[in-house]
Each structure stands twice: as C-alpha cells, then as structure tokens.
Image (cartoon, helix red, strand yellow):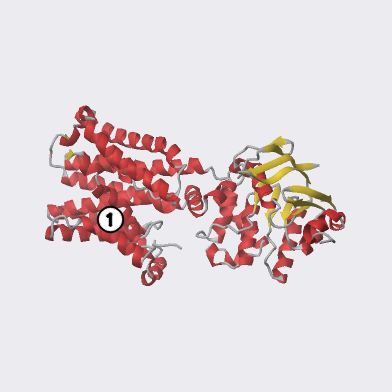
C-alpha cells in the first residue's frame, strides 16, 4: 500500500467518526462541503474531461431534488424516490444531449445556461406539480447525521468512480474528444454516443445529490435548487481547483466552501461574491487552477495525486 | 486488385469547386502518390475518403463496398486510417495514449488492455518513439509529431493508410527515417496512399502517381510517365511562352 492510500484511509475513518465528536455546525458544514465536491466532480466529467463547459449542470441537481420531493410526498418511500431522481436526471441528460451536443464551445455553454433559467421558470409556474414559488415541503425529521453519511458515501462513490472511469477506455475517448473532436471521430470514436454517455453519468451523480439534499434540508423552492448560487458552484470550484484533474474540484470545493462560510458569517450576501472572485482570480493568475500552480504541481505529481 | 476507388468525385465549397469529377484507383499493396500544386484539392480528396466531408457527386468504394456517406468512425473501423497535414495529435495526451486511442477505438473489435498496450509498445518502437512514450504530445518536435501521427494511424491496424504530407518540412535524416517506415509499412501489406510535395520521396516510393490540378485529375501513371507529362510540367512550371 502506498502512502497516499493510507492517508485516504485514515481520512475516511476520521470523517466517519467525526459527527460523534464535533458540534452539529461542523457536521452540517462538512455535509455542504461533500455536496459541493459531488457537484463539482460530476460537473468535471463533462467540463474537464470531455471539454464541454456545462453551465447548466445544476439543472440536474434541481431535477433530482424536485423529482425526489414530489415522489416522497406521494408516499413512494426514500429508496424509490431517490432511484427515480437518478432516472429522471439521466433520461433528461440523454434527451438534451442530442440537440445540445451539436453546439460547441461557448454556444454549448450558453445553451446549457439557458436551461437552468428555463427550469427555474417551469418550477415557478407549474404550481400543481412543484408548488410554484412557495416550494415543496417534505415530512420534517432530524436527519443531519444520516444525511451526512449518505452525502459522504455519495462523495466517495463519485470520486472513486470518476477515478476509475478516467483511467478506462471511456475516459480515453473523452479526453481525445476534448483535444480534437474531429480527429477523434476519424479514429473510430463515435463522438455523439460518448458525449451523451458522459453527460448521463455526470447527471446521475448530480441528481442523486439533489435528492439527498432535499431529504436533508426538507424544504426546496425554485430559487434554492435552480438559482444562480447553486449554478455557479460546479464551474467556479472546478475551475479554481483545476479542471480535468481528479483532485482539482476537491481542492476548489474545500477552498470556496471555507471562504464562503467565513464570509457569510461576517458580511451577509458577500459570500456570493466568492464565486465571481474565484473565476476572475483563476482567469488572471492561474488558468490551470490551484493544482497546476508551478510550486504545487511537482509535489502533487510525486504523490500521485496529479498526472500530466 | 483495386482496394480503394473513387468515381466522379465532386466537391463544392459554396460556389467554389474544390474537386471536379475525379476518378482514381488505388491498387492493394501498392504505394500510390498524390501530387499537385497548392490548392489542387489533394487534402479535400482525403477528407472525402475519410468521411469528414460528403461529396456533392460521385462515390468512393472500398473493396467494392460503397463508403461514400459513412461516418468517419465507421470508415476508420473498415480499415482506412489517415494522418493530418496540419499535424493534429491529441496534444494534451501522452504519446502512448495517443496511440492507444487508435488501438482501442480505431479497430473493429475490442482488444484487452494488456494486448493493446503491447501493441502500442511495438508500434512506438516501429516508429522510433519508444523513448518518448510518456511525454505529452505537445512536448515533441515536428518530426516526432509527424511520426506520432503515423503511429496513431497504424494503431488502427489499417488496410489503407492515407498519409497527408508526412515528409514535408523534415530534415534529410528524418526524411530518410520516415521513408523507410513507409516502405516497411507497405511490406507489411498495408496499402499506402500519400500526398507529398517532396519529389524525392514521391518518386522514390510510389508505384503510381496521380496528379491533381485545380480540382481535376490531369495525369496518372508511373513516376516516370508523370514527370514527363507536358500537362504536369505546365501545371508546376507554367507555359513556355508568356
């Protein structure tokens, strides 16, 4: 076993034991952090490996959240509702991938960005289904600890699966498409199929996260799940940490979640600026993200956390 | 036996005709050269064969099978692979992974991981790139990138290899290396169809040469026949009288 495996193992045990020793605030904070990691990592499948900046990634989160809430209130139970949340998210991803992946570059980003606005409006106006602006309330219970474990589990699953996927044949096809889509196609890669699969996998994590989040937070409305705040989470975190590297979005999520937490306890609403500031800083000083900074790159590569 | 054949291939870009009813035949196991002045339509012809463009008229057949409107990835699976004139390796990927793309996806069946990596190793050795296997493609120089282009194409285990100016721009030593590799590839039974400006290479390697000018085929034959063809001389050097 390498050093890094031991570190990960100890870290995991620490996170499993933590809720029993720390105040609830800490548990809630870590839950938020893990959620951000899940969203940022799953975004990065399409954003970092496939090379398509998907600004509407949070639409999957929202779809999962609403599907879960509606079904749970319809007495389908936790398990079935979560499953349905994944299914609806994935199906939707498959559906939009055909028109959307005909677009490239900024056009794709803009189209996906339009998607979340569309869903926000739909959620506001389909009152009979979504409750409109008053949102949906599910049965309230104290669920912090259990929700923490679910989110931690999903976080580990997401990172682990992405680790395996990006080292597989599928990941090779994604990066080939990112580097040069036309050439990738002349080398036998069915580009549309691979882009579609990437978006579906990416959507599955985000929509399940949406379901877990709803279960934990009890109340959702269009602003919470389709709003700009959650929409900026994946992009800013993945970009700040380093897109296209497994550890990048994790670093970004740590960084922004902590900064945000400090800021919003000091100056209300100022925490929203953290996303914007992160994107500007990345663009100005570290286009490859934190993990690709000169002085960090080498040590990370030696630890096997970053590959070139 | 004819392995690759084009009949009446015509391609317009808006009003501009890039190719006008071009016929060509490539014999199995041969090296066929494709020459012509800049803008003659050589690369366009390759783009039609590899499925990147669809011709406005005409057909391409491979082993007698119509492949005119197949998708590029299907054409690659059938056994036609190519390199790009404007050298386009996957710059962010390592040399080894570049070749693995061809091996994993360019073939009709699927190879197990171990077999694929062995194969990639032997192709890299063949193209004299073994020492650079872990380098990222953007760390290579032009000569190495051109060899990588060819290595990636060989990874697909092609029956026909389309080489788009793999020699132009190389120094004499590199030119000799790659010419030997092209010959060795042919000796393995791969049919080579190559665009080239370096006359030494075309004339030295080709069994037959096709000449394009302004989108039309103006000559075809052995290197000797072509170089003495008055039409070809006119296209390259102009008319005697001004």
Q: Is residue B84 left or right of residue A231?
A: right
For residue A226, say whether it is visible. Answer: yes
Could you say which quadrant of the image residue A274 lies in? bottom left
The reply, left or right, for residue A89 in relation to residue B212 is left
Secondary element under disc 1, as helix, strand or loop, is helix
Placement of the N terminus of chain A among the 4 image quadrants: bottom left
Measured as percent of width and height from the top left, residue A234 is found at: 31, 51
- Mark 1 belongs to chain: A
Within 10 Å of disc 1 (Cα), the crowding (few <14, some 14-19, many 20+) is: some
In this view, B168 is above or below B43: below
Query: Residue at the spot x=30%, y=46% of the render?
Result: A154
State the residue at coordinates (37%, 46%): A110
Residue under the image location 34 percent in, 67 percent down: A285
Q: Position of residue A126 (x, y in %)?
A: 24, 30
Residue B207 percent coordinates (x, y)? 82, 53
Residue at which label 1 appears: A12
**Residue situated in front as seen by the camera: A98 or B101:** A98
In this view, B237 is above or below A184? below
Residue placed furthest toward the bottom? A295
In the figure, is residue A20 to the left or right of A61? left
**Towards the viewer: B133 or B216:** B216
- Is residue A254 shown to the viewer in this render? no
Give coordinates of residue B42: x percent, y percent: 70, 51
Q: In terms of image quadrants, where is residue A213?
A: top left
Placement of A122 over or under A260, stated as above or below:
above
Q: How many marks?
A: 1
């Amino acid at each position: 076993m390498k050093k890094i495996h031991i570190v990960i193992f100890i870290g995991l045990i620490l996170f499993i034991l933590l809720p029993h020793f720390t105040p609830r605030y800490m548990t809630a904070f870590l839950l938020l952090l893990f959620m951000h990691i899940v969203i940022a990592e799953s975004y990065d499948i399409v954003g970092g490996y496939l090379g398509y900046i998907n600004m509407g990634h949070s639409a999957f989160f929202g779809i999962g959240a609403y599907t879960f809430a509606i079904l749970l209130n319809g007495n389908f139970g936790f398990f079935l509702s979560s499953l349905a949340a994944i299914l609806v998210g994935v199906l939707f991803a498959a559906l939009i991938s055909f028109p959307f992946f005909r677009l490239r570059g900024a056009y794709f980003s803009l189209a996906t960005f339009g998607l979340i606005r569309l869903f926000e409006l739909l959620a506001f106006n389909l009152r009979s289904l979504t409750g409109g602006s008053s949102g949906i309330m599910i049965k309230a219970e104290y669920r912090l600890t259990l929700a923490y474990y679910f989110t931690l589990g999903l976080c580990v699953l997401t990172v682990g699966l992405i680790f395996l996927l990006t080292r597989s044949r599928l990941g090779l096809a994604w990066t080939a498409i990112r580097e040069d889509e036309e050439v990738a196609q002349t080398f036998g890669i069915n580009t549309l199929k691979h882009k579609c699969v990437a978006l579906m996998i990416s959507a599955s994590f985000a929509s399940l996260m949406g379901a877990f989040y709803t279960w934990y937070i009890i109340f959702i409305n269009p602003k919470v799940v389709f709003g700009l705040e959650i929409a900026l989470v994946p992009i800013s975190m993945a970009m700040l940490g380093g897109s296209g590297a497994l550890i990048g979005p994790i670093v970004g999520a740590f960084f922004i979640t902590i900064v945000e937490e400090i800021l919003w306890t000091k100056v209300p609403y100022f925490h929203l600026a953290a996303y914007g500031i992160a994107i500007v800083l990345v663009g100005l000083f570290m286009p490859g993200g934190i993990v690709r900074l000169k002085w960090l790159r080498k040590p990370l590569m030696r630890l096997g956390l970053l590959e070139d | 036996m004819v392995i690759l054949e084009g009949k009446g291939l015509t391609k317009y870009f808006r009003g501009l005709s890039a190719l006008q009813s071009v016929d060509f035949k490539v014999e199995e196991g041969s090296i066929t050269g494709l020459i012509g002045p800049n803008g003659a339509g050589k690369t366009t012809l390759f783009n039609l064969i590899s499925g990147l463009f669809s011709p406005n008229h005409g057909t391409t057949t491979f082993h007698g099978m119509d492949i005119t409107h197949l998708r590029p990835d299907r054409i690659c699976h059938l056994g036609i692979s190519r390199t790009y004139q404007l050298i386009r390796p996957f710059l962010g990927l390592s040399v080894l992974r570049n070749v693995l793309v061809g091996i994993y996806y360019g073939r009709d069946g699927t190879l197990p991981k171990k077999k694929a990596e062995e194969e990639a190793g032997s192709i890299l050795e063949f193209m004299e790139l073994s020492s650079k296997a872990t380098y990222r493609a953007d760390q290579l120089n032009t000569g190495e990138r051109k060899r990588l282009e060819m290595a990636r194409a060989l990874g697909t285990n092609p029956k026909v290899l389309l080489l788009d100016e793999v020699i132009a721009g190389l120094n004499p030593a590199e030119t000799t290396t790659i010419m030997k590799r092209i010959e060795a590839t042919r000796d393995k039974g791969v049919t080579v169809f190559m665009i080239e400006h370096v006359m030494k290479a075309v004339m030295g390697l080709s069994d037959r040469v096709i000449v394009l000018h302004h989108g039309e085929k103006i000559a075809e034959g052995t290197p000797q026949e072509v170089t003495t063809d008055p039409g070809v001389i006119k296209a390259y050097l102009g008319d005697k009288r001004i």
